[in-house]
Amino acid sequence: MIASGGIGDVFARARAERRAALIPYVVAGDPDRETTLAVIDALTQAGADLIELGIPYGDPLADGPTIAAAGQRALGAGIKFADSIEIAAQARARGAAPILFFTYVNPVDHYGAERFARDARDAGAAGAIVPDVPLEELDAFAPPLRAAGLAIPLLIAPTTPHARAARIAAASSGFVYLVSRLGVTGARREPDVGWVAAEIARLRTTTQLPIAVGFGISTPAHVAAIGAVADGVVVGSAVVDSYAGSRGDEAAAKVGAYAASLRAALPSRG
Amino acid sequence: MSIQTEQTPDARGYFGRFGGVFVPEVLMEALARLEQATREAFADPAFWSEYEGLLRDYVGRPSPIYHAERLVDGPHAPIIFKREDTNHTGAHKINNTVGQALLARRMGKTRLIAETGAGQHGVATATIGAKMGMQVDVYMGAVDVERQALNVYLMKLLGATVYPVESGTRTLKDATNEAFREWAARVEDTFYVIGSVVGAHPYPYLVREFQKVIGVEARAQILERYGRLPSDVVACVGGGSNAMGIFRGFVDDGAVNLWGVEAAGHGVREIDTAASLNAGSVGILHGSRSYVLQDGEGQVRDTHSISAGLDYPGVGPEHSFLKDSGRARYVAIDDDDALAAFHHTARREGIVPALESAHAIAFAQRLAAERGPDGLIVVNLSGRGDKDVRTVAALEGTEVLK
Ligand SMILES: Cc1ncc(COP(=O)(O)O)c(C=O)c1O
């Protein structure tokens, strides 16, 4: 199967360069619109291959305190669902790396899945992750996104039984998102690289899609270790933290430097 | 009295269009195992006999029914209290925690976690945890930890650890988020004891089954004493567990009117309300689709009620189903009327009700006058008001305890 849309190109290019893709996560509107645009530019310049853009939600069940607080800052700044899509459109128009939305089912439900699919496509986004929609509920929201050519990477957790993981991979598009540890985003425990490598090897027997790994990856050393076995490395809370408390150019400089350190840590693969 | 199970939600956990499972993948396997364990336990007479034994000897069931004769002046329908306030720990919450703790033990779990608002469910979980020798960790919004210092201390006394939750609005909604997150982080040894008929499938169903003892008992008691079914059954609705519990006994009796009483707070048309079914819209919160107090963007709203146990922006999916089907009706009582009923019940009956239950009483007083002597109204007195004495005293400018 050919990986779909913009995301396929992301992984193809990284593979051609014999490395994993770097996928940082930021929250749209944290702490304001202009800062987010500057941060996305800085991430792109630092070599981010794909940017996960969080659409803020007040009750993010899959997120730890760092990302939850970033969402609150954005909501406090008055960021609406449509603003997040507009931020993505503006960023893409000025040459940002491909953008993948990350949000929750309730805001999507209210915006409307069809409208979200249309507006996300028009904004030039590559897809969306909605972590509180499991496989069983996918039909309620995925069809319009698929029809609009958007990728829907699904999550596989350490608790997911093997047979179910294969079904999740089969229903995913763009890539498969392997959660590296139990719990929510942001906890700082050493990733279990041995487990991740074994899980990736198993998944490769059931899917052709690239496999990205995230949750709890926070240092260049983690990126080096996971980047040696995965096709993509997602870094969320640590990226959000790297510029928390700053705005505008200052925030961009901080996140740019941090992302460059992650990018430099990606190992070259023979 | 034996408790049989029937009328389950469909295979995907739906009551009509409400319910379902909307949680991160990391919890899907845990919920699947819980569903499996629930099905097996519910089919096992030994499970129910242990549960019923604990309800009898430890909780003190059956709880009595009581005719509150002096509550309403003038011609009126008799008001009968179902006395859940006489249970061990003072509320209906313990019916549920006993059942879930037995399930947890059956599944080999060694640690219970719970969310709590007022602290009643936290205390009920800490209580059964102590009795069964299980570790108990309770998540409680930092604002509530401050407001409910007495119950916080009580939980510690019972050997539980209370974790203040600093995220979001720092109340029950956020404590529930945190309990889900904590479950995701330690899913292998941990059982999440949810406190109401909310959350992802199978929770709304299994909590209802553990609370339906209220309705099963009440129906038999009323028939025995009055020789007829009641005209109306009234219960307060926070997440909706005491109401689902008593409704379950009467839902198949088409002539019995079922009334859920929500907390209007400062009023259902105000921002400061907790009446999800009266003032909310359909959305997804804490893993299921139901009525939710939220804005047009699907962001959950802050709520307000004088009663911490009703101060919740969601409601169990089965209530949403009963509302839309018309089988139950949902009304709202504001802070002032609930407070008046609290005082009135204390003065006229010598019973200090929980502020939550006072909402149901306030509505029943009106209904009793409307129905006249031919009616017969059962009110679920879900808990006693000792926990609220400090709040009520503070409203009157008296400081009972610092
Ligand atoms: C006495 C009492 N009644 C009612 C409630 C509301 O919960 P539910 O609607 O699940 O019965 C609570 C919750 O803390 C309570 O303590």
Image (cartoon, rainbow, N blue to C red):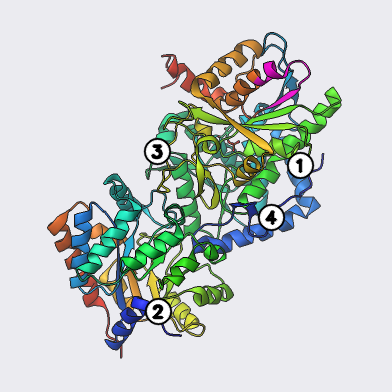
Q: Is residue B147 above or below residue B392?
A: below
Asked if disc 2 is less than 8 Å from ligand 1, the answer is no
Q: Which residues are magenta?
A: B367-379
Judged by depth in the image, the label closer to the viewer, 2 or 3, is 2
Amino acid type assigned to the residue bearing label 4 in the image: Thr
B374 is within the stretch colored magenta: yes
Query: Dot 3: what SS?
Result: helix
Amino acid type assigned to the residue bearing label 1 in the image: Glu
Q: Residue at x 62, y 43 (%)?
A: B324
Q: Residue at x 71, y 17 (%)?
A: B68
The quarter of the rendered structure image containing the C terminus of chain A is: bottom left
Sequence-wise, which precedes: disc 4 or disc 1? 4
Q: Residue at x 40, y 40 (%)?
A: B170
Residue A31 locus on image (x, y percent): 24, 51
* Marks 4,2: beta carbons within 8 A: no
A57 is within the stretch colored magenta: no
Compare residues B402 and A262 and report the one nearer the observer.
A262
Q: Is residue B257 above or below residue B364?
A: below
Question: Residue A216: in sight, yes or no?
Answer: no
Q: Residue at x 67, y 12 (%)?
A: B72
Reading the image, the residue beneath label 4 is: B38
Q: CA distance from mark 3 to mark 1?
A: 35 Å
CA neighbours of label 4 inside 10 A, class few (<14), some (14 to 19), many (20+): many
Query: Dot 2: what SS?
Result: loop
Reading the image, the residue beneath label 3 is: B142
Query: Dot 4: what SS?
Result: helix
Reading the image, the residue beneath label 2 is: A4
Q: CA distance from mark 2 to mark 3?
A: 46 Å
